[in-house]
Image (cartoon, rainbow, N blue to C red):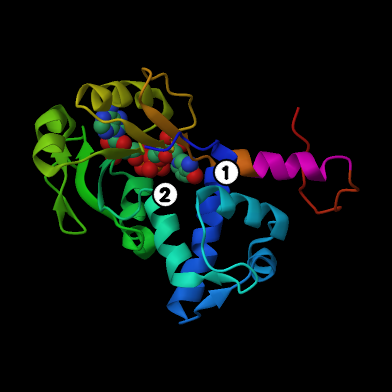
Amino acid sequence: MQDAAPPATVSRLITYLRAVADLHGAGTAITSSDSLAATTGISAYQIRKDLAYFGTFGTRGSGYDVPLVHERLREILGLTTVWRVGIIGMGRLGQAITDYPAFGEYGFSIAAMFDHDPDVIGQEIAGITVTDIRHMPETTASRGVEMVLVTVPAAAAQGVAELAVGAGIRAILNFAPVVLRVPAGVHVEPVDFLAGLKRLSYHLRGLPVLKTPGRTQTA
Ligand code: NAD
């Protein structure tokens, strides 16, 4: 297996895949680094460099072969297999995620749902019955779950992550606003839209503020 690419490169590859998938879907056969730069906002130089690192995707001067780049990016990103995903915490966010139609687009399949609330356990959501979290090890094993989404309150997140790791899970997408401590070899991706808002706030700081009635200042 090729050495793991740095996270920034992986993020760019995901952006390229999105752009190339759109072209592929529209039946476009050939594209160029300039054209990809225009849709992705990443420089043509960076695109050429990234793609050259992973192979040859067309003849020099004639552009990139779209189906080839599409397939190769999917392979590099491990998206040619269907990943079976579990969701831990079937409250508002966990349920909203099951409604997201694009979830399956890249081959992610929700295969199990867990909760600890007796009122939630046994409910059927999007065709899957919510399992008692105490049965996570046998359920993940029997359904081939390899990734989990953590959508429990912050105070419960570390505990459920440990249960997941104990059940053999090596990839966790964490929506709870807490840093998870996991053993080496387990990958955690945090998703925090409030952090995004805070980054935006940082960029707007010091600008003249709108005099909106009721606008308050935090301490
Ligand atoms: P919620 O209270 O509606 O749902 C939480 C669910 O987790 C409940 O069904 C509860 O029974 C279950 N749960 C709690 N402890 C558990 C445990 N130990 N084992 C198994 N299940 C357990 O909460 P929500 O609004 O869906 O938010 C869930 C998490 O997602 C929170 O941490 C919240 O801060 C976070 N959140 C993140 C984003 C984001 O963009 N990242 C957005 C909204 C919410």
- Magenta span covers which residues? 197-206
**Mark 2 = which residue?**
76
Q: Is 26 positioned to the left or the right of 198 in the image?
A: left
Compared with 92, 192 (above or below) is above
| Image quadrant where one finds the N terminus | top left
Location of ligand 1 given as a quarter of the image: top left
Coordinates of residue 131 in the picture (x, y in percent): 14, 39
Residue type indicated by callout 2: Ile
Considering depth in this image, is 217 or 149 the residue closer to the camera? Answer: 149
Mark 2 → mark 1, Cα distance in angstroms: 11 Å
Give whichever of discs 2 and 1 has the lower sequence position.
1
Residue type indicated by callout 1: Thr
Residue at the extreme bottom: 27
- SS majority, magenta: helix
Asked if the residue under mark 1 is in contact with the one under mark 2, i.e. CB atoms within 8 Å, the reply is no
Considering depth in this image, is 35 or 123 the residue closer to the camera? Answer: 35
Coordinates of residue 108 in the picture (x, y in percent): 30, 53
**Mark 1 = which residue?**
9
Considering depth in this image, is 37 or 101 the residue closer to the camera? Answer: 37
Considering depth in this image, is 139 or 16 the residue closer to the camera? Answer: 16
Which mark is drawn over residue 43? none
Q: Residues within 10 Å of mark 2 (few under 14, many from 20)?
A: some
- Determine the secondary structure under disc 1: helix
In percent of the image, x 37 and y 53: which residue is there? 75
Compared with 106, 193 (above or below) is above
Q: In which quarter of the image is residue 182?
A: top left
